Amino acid sequence: MKRTHDILLIKGNNYLASYIEYLNFKIKKNEMKKSLVTLGLVITLMTPALLNAQKVVCKIKGSDTCLPLSQKFAEDYGKKYAGSGISVVGGGSGVGFAALISGTTDIAQASRKMKIDEKLKLQDAGKAVKEVIIAYDALAVIVNPSNPVSQLTREQLEGIFTGKITNWKQVGGQNLKIIVYSRETSSGTYEFFKEHVMNKRNFASSALLMAATGAVIQSVSQTKGAIGYVGLAYLEKEVKALKVSYDKGKTFASPSVETAKNKIYPITRPLYYYYVSGVEARVSPLIKYILSPEGQKVVLKEGYVPRS
């Protein structure tokens, strides 16, 4: 009888232990549910605030080279963060810097570095300026597709754009007058080309200055003897990009994302955003997005060269 009693006691204890374990499990489960509900509530309450913190409302103005890229940034960022409103306008790097100085834009987009006199104007106004490289670009020299010339040295380009070389037969082409198309003087691309391709010499007086990159493309595509220069992202089948040599004809390279990234193509440059420190908090989420892997994928997709 004692043995039977002991067995029943052991069984009773086992049942009690199991029941206690079951109760503990239920308690923990309920606490977990409560914790999850609380966490979900916190996330729900915080999400609008977090999204609102990422919302950007600003104006970007300047370089036509940067224009398509900035427009794509604005479009994608607006889809990602509702309530954002980013307006983008071209006109040239100089126009963007003038707007930044006057306080009529939040960000100046530029295909050249800010000049000393432009920085001084901002300093005189008590404004500290921030510089960010958003991407890189290759500058393509373009001709009409019917032109048999396919490559030129830097020295030949200098001769053509300064007016010393006036006929295509002087560089191995047809007996055809060269028509030079250039961006206007407010363009950062104009200044970069003058400094890095023309060795800081002046353009020929006969050069036709275009207000926008699209106008250069259109003019060269419609004129047999034409030559011009545009940012890589603007290249279209209506024009032909020339191979360029910076070692007096020993090696030539075509403009592309790959050759620019590998520094094989010689005419490459950074693209910039400039803004004053007073708007940094407002534009910072956009800048962080642009510099992120996601933003740099947009750079590559749009035909520009990523930062790394």
Image: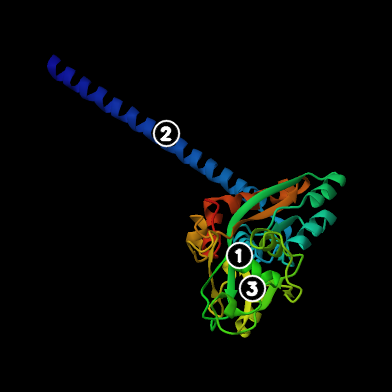
Q: Which residue is mark 1?
A: 155
Kind of residue sitting beneath label 2? Lys
Task: From this view, report whether residue 226 is shown above or below residue 244.
Answer: below
Place of residue 232 in the rendered image (x, y in percent of width and height, measured from the top left): 57, 66
Task: From this view, report whether residue 261 is shown above or below residue 46.
Answer: below
Mark 2 and mark 3 lie on one chain; the one further toward the N terminus is 2
Place of residue 246 in the rendered image (x, y in percent of width and height, measured from the top left): 55, 60
Tell me whether circle 2 and circle 1 mark residues in contact (CB < 8 Å).
no
Secondary element at image label 2: helix
Is the residue marked by circle 3 packed among few (<14), some (14-19), or many (20+) residues within 10 Å?
Answer: many
Quadrant location of the N terminus?
A: top left
Identify which residue, 116 or 271, lies in the foreground: 116
Q: Which residue is mark 3?
A: 228
- How far apart are the alpha carbons under marks 2 and 3? 74 Å
Place of residue 178 in the rendered image (x, y in percent of width and height, measured from the top left): 64, 79
Is the residue marked by circle 1 packed among few (<14), some (14-19), or many (20+) residues within 10 Å?
Answer: some
Secondary element at image label 1: helix
Query: On the image, which quarter does residue 58 sit in?
Result: bottom right
Kind of residue sitting beneath label 3? Gly
Kind of residue sitting beneath label 1? Glu
Q: Which residue is mark 2?
A: 28
Q: Is residue 191 visible?
A: yes
